[in-house]
Structures are given as C-alpha cells and as structure tokens.
C-alpha cells in the first residue's frame, strides 16, 4: 500500500496502536514516513503532540551549545569541518572563554551545556584530554548545570574519567544504521566502534544520545531502521537532522530534502519513543525552523548559541547567531506561541535522575561485520537491532 493511498481506518489504527503504547512494525513506520496528504500528516503530528503532553506536559528543555574546537582529523563526507575543508572557520576556545560562554548560557536560562568538538588532533594526542576534563569540571562548578559532551569516539579510559567527573550525557550519532551507507558517510570510522562507545558510556552510567541524518542517500526503509534501532538501543535522546549541504565537501552538490521528511521523522520517533527526549535543532533552519519541529512533537531545543561569542554552529555555521536569534528569549517567544514553556531546572534534574535510576548494566558488544549481529549475553538481552531490521542497503 502506498501511503498517500493509505485509507483513514488504517492510519487511525496505526495511531491508536501508538497511543496505546504498542510498538509499530517496520512497514507501518515506512507508511507513516511516506505520507503526503496534509490531513494525514497533521493527524500523525497531533498524536505525537498528545504523547509528548502525556509524558512531559507542556514543558520543554533547552540546551546551550558550545562548539569549542572546530579542528578535526576526520573526513565525514557531510561535514563542513572535515579535515581537508579549507573554507570552514577553525578555532579552539581556551578554558576561560568556554567558562565565560557557559556562564552566559546558564544565566540566560538553559538546562544543560553541550561541549562539542571535532576530533581535534591536539586533544586526541596523549594527555590532550586533560584540557577537556578540566573544562568539564570548571563548567560544571561555574554553572551548576548538567553537561553533555560531544567529542567523537574517545578512548575508553577517557570516557571513564568523563563519567567519574560527573558528565551526564554522551552524544554520539550513527547518522544512519545502514552499515554500507555509514561507510560512505563516516569514512574510515567503524560503525560498531561508534555504537559500542555509546553502549560503553551507558554502561558507565551516562545518558546517551543517538541520531540520524536525512538526505544523505538513505531510503525510507533505512529511516525506519534507524528509528527502530534507536528505540531498541533504548537511547535517552534520539535526534534527526536534515543534511545542510556544505561547500567544498563531497555532498556540496546535494539538493536539500523537503523538511516535511524531518518533521515526519520527529513525529514518528515520538510515537515509537514517547518518553524519550527528541530535539528540535536550531542548527538546521535557525529560529524559523523551531515551530514546525515543536508541532511534530520535539521536546528539547538544541543548539542555543549566545551572540557575540564568535562561536560556530555545525550544520549552519553562522545562521541566526550574531543576530541573537539562537538565544533563549527568542526560543521562549516561540514556545509561548504554542502554549509551551521552558521547564524549571529542578524538573530537568528530576528527569535525569529518573533515567539514571533505570540504567542497566546488561549491554553487550556489537560486531563490526555488517552481516553478523551478535547479541549480548546475560540480562541485558540483545543489543542488535530488532527483528525485522534488515541492516542492509538493499531496499
Ligand atoms: N565531532 C563529533 C562527532 O562527529 O561526533 C561531534 C560533532 S557533532 C556536533 C556533529 C554532528 O552534527 C554529526 O554527528 C551530524 O549528525 C551533524 N552534522 C554535521 N554536519 C552536518 C550537516 N552538514 N548537516 C546536518 N547535520 C550535520
Ligand atoms: C545541535 N549543533 O544540537 C548541535 C549538535 C551535538 N551534541 C549537537 C549537532 O544541533
Ligand atoms: Fe569531524 Fe564530527 Fe565533522 Fe565528522 S562530523 S568531520 S568527526 S566534526
């Protein structure tokens, strides 16, 4: 059945299942993701908002973003900051600059500070992570806020130190759960190594975020696989972002996909993972993109960047930053217009505490071979993608 021909009873049945807490099949997800008529799409988003409301009321979380080093040793084909791109702004913020920016973000009312970097060779060398450890400590003490780190695939001993130093979140996105496509996106980086690092972080007691990119050559089936994989892994935060084609990268010539694809993914992720955090990133379309992502069921606003900080975004290196449009007051105006509001800091801490209480240690290793899906032994059960997951590029 194609989607636009999906009959009303079939769609209502899927939404009824989702609202009743029953998971959806791969086929059902694909059908939702390929919807084209406005009425049906609005129904899906309405269900997504209903589930958000049930789990989070009208409260949203706001994340401050500090991209403190834009140097990177990698060659991700979608990224403006890949090693060989001579056009991207390269900088490394020093400790006191980062602490000042974090303090400003905290004063403006964010709930968390996301410390993000490229895989900076200066930091990845022996001893280089001490700078990041000190930064985390100073940011935590100065702001009193939880910290997320987005540093790439760091060594296990460093991850352990980060966990010991009280980092709450580790963000590491697969971009796609199709291993063949992954190899074309994250050139020379292991799929399993990335996934296992996220599993390791979780084992150490951290909350974890995974994410998928749209418009990078994936099929609708791949999108459904990603959603099911993120659900199955039980990530605490699951994101989707549309590719913003970047100059002087292998994906420069790609046509950006219609944003409805991203809105539908957000909505379907909410149907499948109603109590997880799902971001609306300001890093794709800036502040003007916020409303539709909220409409689709997102409950975190990410990539809040203070003006006059000379910081860059990732997929939109400059959009809305200097004008102060990626800041909390602008975000709050849009939330208010939708009957939503920023949660209190206590509400965010309570949510984190509730999740930490649930973290299990029963996670296993994932195999680098795309054809084998090893399952974890013991109480944690399978950590591979769920039954029905194809895990191939063939569709
Ligand atoms: N270097 C670390 C890493 O790659 O894990 C942390 C950087 S993290 C901010 C980079 C994320 O931004 C990627 O995982 C990807 O999901 C997203 N991203 C990068 N370039 C993008 C682009 N051109 N369009 C959309 N999203 C992009
Ligand atoms: C964002 N630019 O939230 C940031 C970034 C990294 N943890 C997050 C992708 O959109
Ligand atoms: Fe480097 Fe991250 Fe960009 Fe890949 S996505 S090139 S690892 S900054």
Image (cartoon, grey):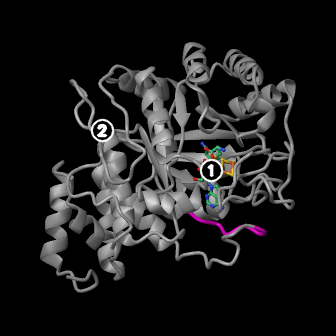
Q: Is residue 52 visible?
A: no
Q: Disc 1 designates what residue? A: 331
Q: Element under label 2? A: loop
- For the image, the number of numbered tags is 2
Q: Nearer the observer, disc 2 or disc 1? A: 2
Judge whether 382 appears above or below 215 on screen.
Answer: above
Q: Is residue 243 magenta?
A: yes
Check the image and report above or below for 185 versus 352.
below
- Give the numbered dot on residue 383: 2
Residue 365 seen by the camera:
yes
Q: Position of residue 233 (x, y in %)?
A: 34, 40
Q: Magenta part of the protein: which range? A: 242-248
Residue beneath the point at 42% across and 32% down? 199
Image quadrant where residue 223 sits = bottom left
Q: In what quadrant of the picture does the C terminus appear?
A: bottom left
Q: Earlier in the sequence, mark 2 or mark 1?
A: 1
Q: Position of residue 175 (x, y in %)?
A: 51, 55
């Amino acid at each position: 059945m194609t989607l636009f021909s999906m009959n009303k009873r079939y769609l209502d049945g899927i939404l009824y299942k989702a609202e009743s807490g029953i998971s959806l099949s791969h086929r059902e997800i694909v059908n939702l993701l390929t919807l084209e008529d406005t009425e049906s799409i609005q129904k899906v988003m309405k269900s997504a908002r209903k589930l958000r409301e049930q789990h989070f009321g009208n409260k949203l979380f706001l994340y401050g973003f500090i991209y403190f080093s834009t140097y990177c040793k990698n060659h991700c084909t979608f990224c403006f900051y890949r090693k060989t791109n001579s056009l991207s702004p390269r900088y490394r913020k020093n400790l006191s600059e980062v602490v000042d920016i974090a303090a400003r973000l905290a004063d403006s009312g964010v709930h968390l500070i996301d410390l993000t970097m490229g895989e900076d060779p200066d930091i990845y060398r022996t001893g280089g992570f001490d700078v990041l450890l000190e930064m985390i400590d100073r940011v935590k003490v100065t702001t009193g806020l939880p910290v997320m780190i987005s540093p790439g695939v760091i060594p296990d001993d460093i991850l352990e130190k980060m966990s010991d130093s009280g980092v709450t979140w580790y963000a590491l996105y697969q971009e796609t759960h199709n291993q063949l496509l992954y190899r074309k996106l994250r050139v020379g980086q292991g799929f399993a190594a990335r996934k296992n690092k996220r599993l390791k972080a979780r084992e150490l007691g951290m909350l974890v975020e995974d994410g998928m990119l749209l418009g990078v050559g994936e099929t609708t089936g791949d999108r459904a696989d990603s959603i099911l994989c993120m659900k199955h892994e039980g990530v605490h935060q699951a994101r989707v972002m549309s590719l913003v084609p970047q100059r002087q990268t292998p994906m420069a010539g790609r046509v950006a996909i219609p944003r409805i694809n991203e809105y539908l993914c957000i909505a379907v992720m909410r149907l499948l993972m109603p109590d997880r955090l799902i971001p609306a990133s300001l890093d794709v379309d800036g502040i003007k993109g916020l409303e539709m992502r909220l409409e689709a069921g997102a409950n975190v606003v990410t990539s809040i960047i203070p003006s006059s900080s000379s910081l860059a975004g990732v997929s939109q290196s400059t959009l809305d930053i200097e004008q102060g449009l990626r800041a909390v007051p602008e975000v709050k105006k849009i939330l208010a217009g939708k009957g939503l509001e920023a949660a209190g800091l206590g509400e965010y801490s309570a949510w984190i505490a509730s999740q930490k209480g649930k973290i299990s240690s029963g996670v296993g290793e994932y195999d680098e071979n795309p054809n084998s899906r090893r399952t974890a032994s013991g109480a944690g059960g399978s950590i591979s993608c769920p039954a029905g997951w194809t895990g191939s590029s063939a569709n």
